[in-house]
Amino acid sequence: MYLSELQLDHYRNYEQVDVHFSPDINVLIGENAQGKTNLLEAIYVLALARSHRTHNDRELIQWNSEFARITGIVQRKTGHTPLELIVSQKGKKAKVNHLEQAKLSQYIGQLNVVLFAPEDLNIVKGSPAVRRHFIDMEFGQMSAKYLYNISQYKSILKQRNQYLKQLQRRQAKDLIYLGVLSDQLAAYGAEVTIARREFLQQMEKWAQKLHQEITKERELLTFRYQSQIPDDQLALDTEGLYQQFQTLYETQQSREVEQGTTLVGPHRDDVTFLVNGKNVQSFGSQGQQRTTALSVKLAEIDLMKEQTGEYPVLLLDDVLSELDDLRQTHLLKTFQNKVQTFLTTTSLENVKKEIISAPRVFTVTNGTVAMVTTEVN
Amino acid sequence: MQYPEPIAKLIESYMKLPGIGNKTATRLAFYTIDMNEDDVTSFAKNLISAHRDLHYCSVCGNITEEDPCEICRDTTRSQDMILVVEQPKDVMSLERMNDYHGLYHVLHGVLSPIEGKGPDDINIANLIKRLQKTPAKEVIIATNATPEGEATAMYISRLIKPAGIKVTRLAHGLSVGSDIEYADEMTLLKAVEGRQEI
């Protein structure tokens, strides 16, 4: 699918804008603070009815305006669909094909996007908590069962930690109840671990393929799921894992009470990304880390294709400047003629022109967008 | 300008009720002023009587005017079945079903360390004492299908199962007369898991 037109009214620093995009590669050039990221954000908001940058929708409305409107036309294999999203002080209104949708959940999914922003580098460089959050969000979107299991797990974990604190301070003494909480945690923990392992295998398959394409087969990306359950035991079924966790909770009980917190379970797991067998977080170069983050995040493109049958729209915010020419070339070649791509950059110097066949180039200056008519080639 | 003291106090009282904030409380207070005197008097009486004349049944923990409650005194009910619920409201719902003829036990909450509710803070000890006095054949646990409800059910079952009492839990699944089309994914998943041979 691709976005053929976009109109903005009173959106952030845009008074009024009407742009027609190429189904292939669209380059947005502009100095800092001119509105490049705002334009990518607008496409993201049109797709998901929320921003990746803020929770406060009022920030999306231009200063001194009552409302912001984003409209666009999505082209799919089956035809075109006009989308409209109005953000006002009172809330959001979403229209598909000019018909207002009662629920935002009915609206979301009309336009699929995958966004890569500079902060996504944290998937590789950040703490294990960042990676757990990332996989929980990704897998939660793909499976309602996973979302249910992880949210049950988290709420039981909170109760158990609180109870362990009470045991630690001797405000409570009932170990039968602790046993009940351990069993519950073990049951959901086993489900979460199994699902993460399965989803990570799918994701690894796609990320690996992408990574090889971007690095011209020089680098092999692999994932390693790190859990307190030994690797050879991870292949167990739900029942087997459940028993493993139960045993761990039994053996760790006195330590857990002493420290007043849960020491065992998938809430302490992590994923390590390995390039040619080496941990990228500790031993990779900046470029390798960035490429890894890209491959992992952009694996979502293929996962979405598998699920919906169409490629989503790709938004790359300020990504190229930090990759070398070779990686830039292969990144863009990978998606060329398949995935509609929007990328922001401060100057075209950064982009090797010959690598992109006929990109549509737009200059962004202080809230205006102009198409550069002379093709760059 | 400030409200005269009687109305300010009334607003304050209304605000003590759950789900009622400043605005609603003010609206209710002004409405109360315009009500006729008889209604207001009986309203006030009802409030006091609900508080003074109701007790918790010393056997099952349900709300009652007399102790033990009507259900616990009813000898025509099956004495070897006890259905455990979280709230007195749940007893009312189950009684409306008009098909269960055993006894009840009201926990007044579920185990939740975060809300400061441990095993000693809900009505579990009474259930154990009750079972020691007159052992039931079956205990049906009807706590809600929340993680806390499940944990409470599991806890109770561990306490009483060793005594050889059969412990059962309500089924999960589709509600009667509903369309599969409108069921959420997790309900469907539970329904498939709990399928039965026909």
Image (cartoon, coloured by chain):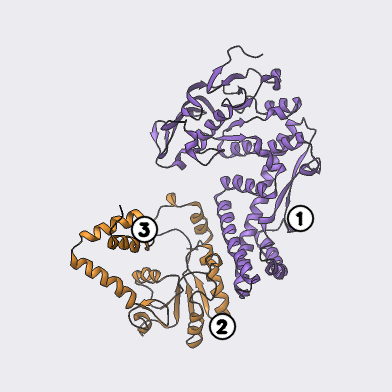
Residue named by callout 2: B163
Q: Position of residue A72 (x, y in %)?
A: 48, 27
Front in this rendered view, residue B4 or A94: B4
The amino acid beneath tag 1 is: Asp
The chain identifier of the residue carrying mark 1 reads A
Q: Are marks 1 and 3 in contact (CB under 8 Å)?
A: no
The amino acid beneath tag 2 is: Ala
Colour in which chain A is shown? Answer: purple
Residue B108 in view, yes or no: yes
Measure the alpha-carbon separation of dots 2 and 3.
Answer: 46 Å
Using a 10 Å C-alpha cutoff, classify the residue at mark 2 as few (fewer than 14 neighbours), some (14 to 19) or many (20 or more).
few
**Outermost residue, front direction?**
B1
Q: Secondary structure at mark 1?
A: helix
Residue named by callout 3: B20
Is B43 positioned to the left or the right of A248 in the image?
left
Using a 10 Å C-alpha cutoff, classify the residue at mark 3 as few (fewer than 14 neighbours), some (14 to 19) or many (20 or more).
few
Residue named by callout 1: A231
Are both tags, 2 and 3, on one chain? yes
